[in-house]
Amino acid sequence: MAIQLHSEHKYMTVPPKTFPLNSPLYLKFTSTSSISPRLSVFSISLKKLEMGLVSSLRFRRRNNKTFLRIFMILVLSCIPGRTNLCSNHSVSTPIDLPPGNPSDIRSLLDSLDLEGYISFDDVHNAAKDFGNRYQLPPLAILHPRSVSDISSMMKHIVHLGSTSNLTVAARGHGHSLQGQALAHQGVVINMESLRSPDIKIYKGQQPYVDVSGGELWINILRETLKSGLSPKSWTDYLHLTVGGTLSNAGISGQAFKHGPQINNVYQLEIVTGKGEVVTCSEKRNSELFYSVLGGLGQFGIITRARIALRPAPHMVKWIRVLYSDFSAFSRDQEHLISKENTFDYVEGFVIINRTDLLNNWRSSFSPNDSTQASQFKSDGKTLYCLEVAKYFIPEEANSMNQETEKLLSELNYIPSTLFSSEVPYIEFLDRVHIAERKLRAKGLWEVPHPWLNLLIPKSRIFDFATEVFNNILTSNSNGPILIYPVNQSKWNKRTSLITPNEDILYLVAFLPSAVPNSSGKNDLEYLLKQNQRVLSFCAAENINVKQYLPHYETQTEWKSHFGDRWETFAKRKYAYDPLAILAPGQRIFQKATHLSPIQLL
Ligand code: FAD
């Protein structure tokens, strides 16, 4: 996602959301059934109950939905320590500290035999994320040196069971937006410390690279380029970890062709919520494999991934053209993603109420016709920029130029607005980092980011664009708005990623930076309300949008996000993380309390 400079503003720190410590934990069981959650207080062995239910299930051998629902409710309600898998609590409900003396917990964690180490001081960095709106300090940070460090920690916490409220968040690069990688008073695992295995490349018919789950994509790119290879699918920004993006999807301008990053993984190594180390792939432990991909960190910690590679190009022809008519813009985008021989990257963005736009581009792009370009006036209009790229090696520059010209001749952009540039492949892929460096130098990187990412079905994109870009938003001077279609029919449907049910979807990403203590359109509250207006419009108009990088406050909202896939998601949670220890910052499930004794599976 492109980042924009806001040089004229002075940013200040905004008071982050904090939750009081030592406040009571409320557990309320309000599932679709009235069956009590407290079966665990009776001395029923969970294992026996499970076995009975499973054999009864076998006996029935019917895919009866009602029966499945009752089964789920019974099983979920029997989870040791009353894991609140089916509560309707507001997930912002304050969570209390682990019971007993925190120093006991510290010494318990300290007693672990690790190759890495645990730190109890200096936890403030793991208390926030890129979104910069939540401040939730963990109790400790694990800096693992090996997979067994992570497994030992998980097993230890499973063993403590409901006698502690300890949760665990794998933290990649902490570039989440709403506290998804935080674990309030729990253990944050600093995945970037996990340096093994080294990045290992395998050439051949189907080349791939084995990497640690804590590896940054930029490092993988640098390393694979040495062998003339590269991953196929990217995010716009590469200083994110493999585990972080595979827990979501990893979508960028290549996703229409290769699918998101979760479509380009051959194998994973996972430490589950029970502490087990499991290798999985499409053929081996496939249920876990697909659960974890797009699984929001709920089922296990990705410690290793095998990523598909392709031959790397050397150079990229990078092109921008403008439209004033949304229909023409989206028609051309859809035309490009439907073709077999097309660009390698297709994205786009919206420009609302900006002046001097083309002059800004001149620093990195050259106009095709500078006289015509200088006559173009963007003042005040809502414009749509199509951004495309063609990869090439220098020996093929001529044929690449011919193909590019042919593709451009099929489009209906404003002729005077054709701009292009040729850059090395790595510079193109790492483009947002250049903006990051500039923002950091000005102290403008660590400000609140009230971002909103939506997946919108093609059938409603025109309604969405007409209202949102013309009425709800009156400017986008505080950050870019990306918009581009992807062809979901090429995506694997077995992952945990939730998308609207249409072949072509648009990713629309509102990426503003808030200016603390400002009033008006750059203020955090204003931007949050604007996001809410967009969501309310979609709800009122029955536009079946799905949030990408989703964030919800209640489990009812999560259930609606998952729709008919909720039961499967909850069932998988029970299978792989029955105490709901993992990724508490997603606020989907709540960890067991210390109120009832633990029965280990
Ligand atoms: P974190 O924020 O550290 O973690 C995210 C979630 O994954 C947390 O729940 C965490 O517990 C879990 N997690 C982390 N590591 C693991 C692991 N090893 N195993 C299991 N769970 C784990 N996304 C796109 O798809 N396309 C884009 O173009 C794009 N551009 C971005 C640009 C910027 C500047 C930023 C800040 C974000 C962008 N994102 C984009 C979003 C990004 O992909 C997600 O926020 C991603 O989660 C960040 O990765 P991370 O390593 O920082 O993960």
Image (spheres, grey):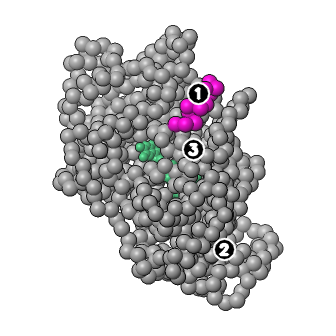
> Mark 2 falls on what kind of element?
helix
Question: Residue sitting at 24 percent across and 13 percent down?
Answer: 371
Q: Is residue 31 above or below residue 300?
A: below
Question: Disc 2 designates what residue?
Answer: 159
CA separation in Å, label 3 and label 2: 29 Å
CA separation in Å, label 3 and label 1: 16 Å
Magenta-drawn segment: 218-230
| Residue 199 visible (yes or no) | yes
In this image, 246 relative to 25: left or right?
A: right
Question: Residue sitting at 27 percent across and 27 percent down?
Answer: 360
| Quadrant in the picture for residue 71 | bottom right
Task: Kindly identify which numbered label has been placed on residue 215.
Answer: 3
Question: Disc 1 designates what residue?
Answer: 225
Could you classify mark 1 by the number of other residues whose Cα lies within 10 Å: few (under 14), some (14-19), or many (20 or more)? some
| Residue 180 visible (yes or no) | no
Q: Main secondary structure of the magenta part?
A: helix
Sequence-first tag of 3 and 2: 2
Q: Amino acid at mark 3?
A: Glu
Residue 262 lies, in percent from the top left, at 59, 45
